[in-house]
Image: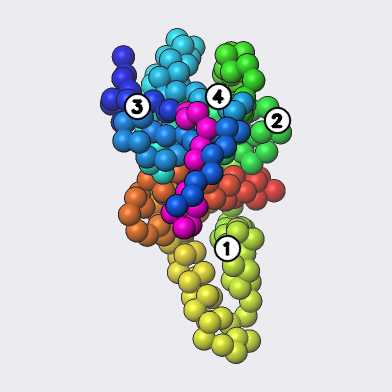
Amino acid sequence: MPSLSEYGLEWDVIKSHGIKAIMPNGDESVYSGKYNALVRGDNHSFLGVVGNSYQVIQNSELLALAERIEPLGFNICNGGEFDDGKLVFIQLSGASRQVGSKGDDVVEPYFLLFNGHDGLRSMEGLPTSIRVFCKNSLNMAISDGRRKGMTITIKHTGDIASKIEALYEVVERYYVTRDAFFNTANELASKDVNRDWLQNFWANVYSELYDDIVQDNPNTFTTDSQMRRYMKAKSTMLKWSMTWDREYPIFGANRWIALNSATNWVDHDTQFRGEGKEKRRIHSNLLGINAKNKARMLELALA
């Protein structure tokens, strides 16, 4: 069985009894019993500030929940932390499926459990997927999954045990969500497209999510800034086109491949700089702005 040490999660979160603030002059301090510090147990790094009603959900509890879910058709396959432990996750994999009738386009469904230790983020369960051919990830709950009850949020207050039990409702819904996602993917794969539709789709995606200058006529530009933005847009869409040219002979010229040509760039080519950039990329692809943008791309492909 997987262990917390495999994923760097073999530590607890400590909730302090009150909190003391040192004043700017260094000679005075202020104590409050209404607020408490969350501290990482292994290295005593500061994670966040919470009220008295806040209840910690430990990494060991998250792993125990994942182990209880496994017999329902999953395998624990990954885990880790972001932002020095302020957000942790455990990922479970399900049985893979093929999308479309051409080639070997396999998508692996996953169920993601993640938990905040910063006092701001709740614990959530989220269905997601990874396309084997290019390692693209896509939230199976699409953009309005929370409204449809496809994910569940567990706040760190109240009866935590009962709330965790309620997570099984989401696991049961997972199969409905999974089937709906693959039905959507196959619907996109069944719709052939021509070059005009493709260029319009990509232009609309880039215009809505990144910069609407791509819709403008460059002959009307009056500044270098406009031209740089336009060239950046065209360079990005050229990358989408290169992915399309590589994949459509294998899987067909359809909306599913058009979508994945764009999401491939989102997952692998969007820029993250500085220390920890790969972890920040993974976080964004699964939970952040990249995940939201990919969900919107899917909606536009269905339109």
The residue under label 3 is which amino acid type? Answer: Trp
| Nearer to us: label 3 or label 1 | 3
Task: Please report whichever mark, 2 or 3, sits nearer to the chain's N-terminal start.
Answer: 3
Q: Residues within 10 Å of mark 1 (few under 14, many from 20)?
A: few
| Nearer to us: label 2 or label 3 | 3
For disc 4, the marked residue is 55
Instruction: Check the image and report above or below for 151 versus 142.
Output: above
Q: Is residue 173 visible?
A: no
Specify whether residue 31 is painted magenta: no
Q: Nearer the viewer, residue 219 or 126?
A: 126
Which type of secondary structure does the marked residue at label 2 adopt?
loop
Task: Please report whichever mark, 3 or 4, sits nearer to the chain's N-terminal start.
Answer: 3
Q: Are marks 1 and 2 in contact (CB under 8 Å)?
A: no
Cα distance between the residues tagged 3 and 1 = 39 Å
Q: Residues within 10 Å of mark 3 (few under 14, many from 20)?
A: some
Cα distance between the residues tagged 2 and 4 = 27 Å
For disc 1, the marked residue is 210
Task: Please report whichever mark, 4 or 1, sits nearer to the chain's N-terminal start.
Answer: 4
Q: Residue at x 42, y 24 (%)?
A: 59
Instruction: Check the image and report above or below for 266 versus 168.
Output: below
On screen, residue 228 versus residue 201, left or right, reads: left
On residue 11, which mark appears?
Answer: 3
Which type of secondary structure does the marked residue at label 4 adopt?
loop
Residue 53: image location, x then y, percent: 61, 26
Task: Please report whichever mark, 3 or 1, sits nearer to the chain's N-terminal start.
Answer: 3
Q: Nearer the viewer, residue 29 or 2?
A: 29
- Which region shows up in magenta? 15-26
